[in-house]
Image (cartoon, rainbow, N blue to C red):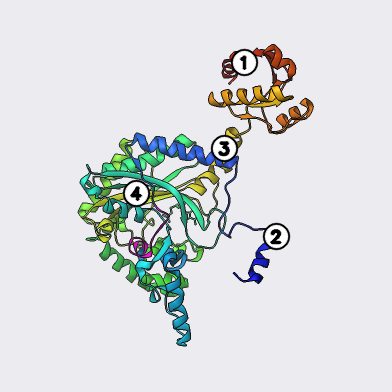
Amino acid sequence: MSEGAAKKEDKPRKFQAIRGTRDLLPPETALWNRVEQTAHEVFATFGFGEIRLPIVEEVELFARAVGQETDIVNKEMCTFPNPMRFSEFYRRLRESVSKGTNEMGTLTDLLPESEMISLRPEATAGVCRAYVEHNMQQLPQPVKLYTMGPMFRWERPQKGRYRQFYQIDAEVLGGTDAPAIDAEVIEMVMTFFERLGLEGVQLDINCIGDKNCRPKYVELLRAELSKVKDKLGPDSQRRIETNPLRVLDSKLESEQKLIERMPHIADHLCEECAENYRGVKKELELRGVKYGENWRLVRGLDYYMRTTFEITAKGLGSQNAVCGGGRYDGLVELLGGLPTKGIGFAIGEDRLILSLLETGHSPLATRHSPLLYIAWMGEKAYTTAIRAAKNLRNAGFRVELPPVEQKFGKALGQADKLGARFALILGDNEVSSGEWTLKTLADGKQEKLGESDLVEHLKKQL
Ligand code: AMP
């Protein structure tokens, strides 16, 4: 490192989290933990096991699974050379610059695609990769997996849209495509949301056909959209060619009336898909799951088929989708596995938490303020205080033990500030008599207690 660089680093400088990323802080993190704990509990009751995946994978995995032509892969994914190959990458970069080629080409012209890695933009690709890699086809089918953690998409940040965000994802792989599987997966998310007390939950479902019937519908849609092409915006105009189904996703106000007049896929399903869709609706009704039908709910990729669903919740403005999911076929094959049926969903955890907060689920209810603050004075009292803190914490109580001696008045003020319910007062008198003083901070009531009674006494107060 040059001297100049060292100097620059020595100069104090404040840092900020990179745009689109953020710190999750207490007390809000208590709510995050409650959400995640509830997911673990609810999903386990449906027979799902947790899988933890790497955050980085080969770029090609996502290019295949999410689709080379999607915005996620094309514009939003964080891709970089494998750090072990940085020097080779820069050598080739320098070489290409010194040759004077104006055309830089893509990153993968400089290193083979297998040497390029990406931060995961979603979880399904990793789950399917792991299913194949660990020969999970040999396990009793279907295999039910869930995972949670950060995802990365470098899109324009706004409320409810981040570059690092969190998803809770579940997938059912293998087995059949019986409508009951789709319904049970949906029932599981709805149970999870209900358990959390999420408000204004609305489930929309649709059936997008399969490779037998969808291509004909797509052609029909393309033809109908072409007739009104001039009246559509540039994005939709482009999509008429590349992916007409995605036009149905459009939120552009000026396009809504035209799109409403387009043919509905429900009228163009083959008999197997229509039968399957009727089955899914019946199975949802059997489970008491309320749903609406939204014929414009589509997925852009070829391997998605039949059931798609989306769940929205209150308090989120325009970014109100908290969960998206659907059935797919052919993805595991695309990743080198045997033909395998799949269905899954991804919950946007940031938005789920935002909705809970907006509808009054205060994280303060689960706040980590101490139950008890130990106000100690004197060396002997300190030893006793350490022992008391250890025993109380072992019993599961939140205890604050101040690291330096303070006058009792100051200590009690501090206990109040931290929101503690009780202060345990330990001074010379208490230590020598073995009679400790427990003060309830709300009303100032003081009680004398022996060391051995304290835990039981506090348990009764909760
Ligand atoms: P997707 O994987 O695109 O189907 O998204 C599934 C869910 O993840 C959405 O319904 C959102 O709740 C959430 N989500 C997707 N992208 C973002 C983002 N950039 N920031 C926050 N949440 C997101």
Q: Which residue is mark 2?
A: 12
Q: Nearer the viewer, residue 425 or 192?
A: 425
Separation (CA) of disc 4 from disc 1: 54 Å
Q: Which residue is mark 3?
A: 361
Tell me which amino acid carries mark 3.
Answer: His
Magenta residues, start to end: 54-66
Tell me which amino acid carries mark 2.
Answer: Pro
- Sequence order check: which comes first, mark 3 or mark 4? 4
Q: Which residue is mark 4?
A: 344
Location of residue 40 in the rendering, given as x and y in whole percent from the top left corner:
41, 38
- Sequence order check: which comes first, mark 2 or mark 3? 2
- Sequence order check: which comes first, mark 1 or mark 3? 3
Separation (CA) of disc 3 from disc 4: 28 Å
- Sequence order check: which comes first, mark 2 or mark 4? 2
| Residue drawn at the location 66% of the way across and 24% of the way down | 383
Tell me which amino acid carries mark 4.
Answer: Gly
Q: Which residue is mark 1?
A: 451
On screen, residue 112 above or below 263: below
State the SS at label 1: helix
- Sequence order check: which comes first, mark 4 or mark 1? 4
Residue 61 within the segment the image draws in magenta:
yes
Q: Residue furthest bottom?
A: 100
Residues packed near mark 4 inside 10 Å, few (<14), some (14 to 19) or many (20 plus): many
- Return the mark for residue 123: none
| Residue drawn at the location 70% of the way across and 14% of the way down | 432
State the SS at label 4: strand
Q: Is residue 390 left or right of residue 404?
A: left
State the SS at label 2: loop
Is residue 441 visible in the rendered image? The answer is: no
Tell me which amino acid carries mark 1.
Answer: Glu
